[in-house]
Amino acid sequence: MSCPIQMASQLSGLSPHVIRIWERRYGALSPSRTDTNRRMYCDEAIERLKLLRELTEQGHRIGNIARMPTEELQKLRDQQLQNRAPTSQPNAFSVDATTPLETHQQFIDLCIEASKAYDSDRLRRLLQRARQQFGQRGMLHHVIGPLIIHVGEEWQAGNLRPSQEHVTTSVIREILMTPVPGSQTAANAPEIIITTPAGEMHELGALLASASARDLGWKITYLGPNLPIEEIAACAKARKARAVALSVVYPENCPTIEAKLRHLRQLLPEPMSLIVGGRAARGYEAKLGSINIQWAHSLNGLDRILTQAVSA
């Protein structure tokens, strides 16, 4: 049975942008077309995309493997799995290729366990395995995103020490800032500036947005957290960016943050999109809904905005 590229993206763990690039630039596969020139992907094509994703995430360059027969890709993948076989039995605090993990929640629960044990290596292995198992988008949407929320809730409830939260944040930051091996950004890709306004020190939301936008084919200029509005605008105009995205987590309903968002919208050229997301964004939307700001209340919401901006 054949399916369109959106379903192929969900099944393979690759963004539609990456699938198209691998087809056009590297000749990785040739999907069939409908009478209206719509791409359609059969089961064999989905399997091939999964194999290519797994191998590129293991460090193979897409240009070197794109045209290999599917059977050779399978052999290469199997060989790598054998090379990664464990030398000892896993225990409650070890995760390897043989540990049975099937659901997103299992990964999240084990990540929390690793955080409480200050085990950054184990946490890193879990997140890398989640990327291999679910693909970049699956990891971002269903593991790291919920994990960030869960860690915040555990910390606020007193179930996670500040030092444990810092270990978790450090590893998540490392994973989010590391592009998927083999991925490439087109030279003419639209550019987005991502940061947090001055006074906003929580950057994981901004990093998550950066990783997702990169996976959708955007060129990322990440400025880090806690930056004055004037500096954000100066960078965006100098780079001639298509969009600016801010993450606002705390404080909520703050008149100072509200004024900063108004000021930034005034400083940016009118055609340049200003996107605001994060836990506190909904409260500011209630007060700033009449001005030209796009509000992303979830990672899916941000993806929709970025996809529409590219196709517009």
Image (tube, rainbow, N blue to C red):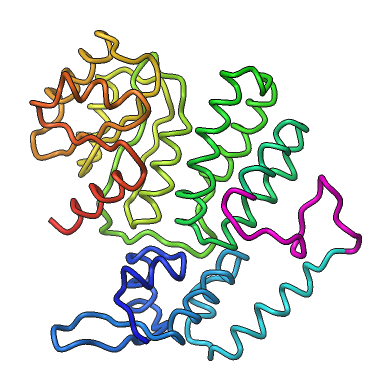
Residue 272 placement: quadrant: top left
Q: Where does the image place residue 282, in percent across and percent down from the top left?
A: 27, 26
- Dividing the picture into quadrants, the one containing residue 4 is bottom left
In the displayed structure, 111 sits above or below 219; it is above
x and y, in percent, of residue 54 in the image: 57, 69
Left or right of 214: which side holds 133?
right
Q: Is residue 105 above or below residue 276?
A: below
Residue drawn at x 73%, y 31% is: 116
- Position of residue 160 relative to residue 175, above or below, is above
**Can you name the residue that lies furthest to the right here?**
88
Residue at screen point 66% across, 42% down: 111
Q: Which residues are magenta?
A: 87-106
| Residue in view at x 50 percent, y 53 percent | 179
Residue 174 percent coordinates (x, y): 58, 41
The extreme top residue here reads 255
Q: Is residue 96 magenta?
A: yes
Is residue 312 or residue 152 the one in the foreground?
Answer: 152
Quarter location, residue 293: top left
* Quadrant where the image shows the N terminus: bottom left
Please tell me how many numbered marks the rendered image carries: 0
Which quarter of the figure is the C terminus placed in? bottom left
Where is residue 84 shown, x and y percent of the image? 77, 67
Q: Residue at x 24, y 27 (%)?
A: 234
The reply to whether the magenta stretch includes residue 9 is no
Q: State whether the magenta stretch is mostly helix, strand or loop.
A: loop
Question: In the rendered view, would you say 274 is above or below 265?
Answer: below
Say left or right for 9 vs 148: left
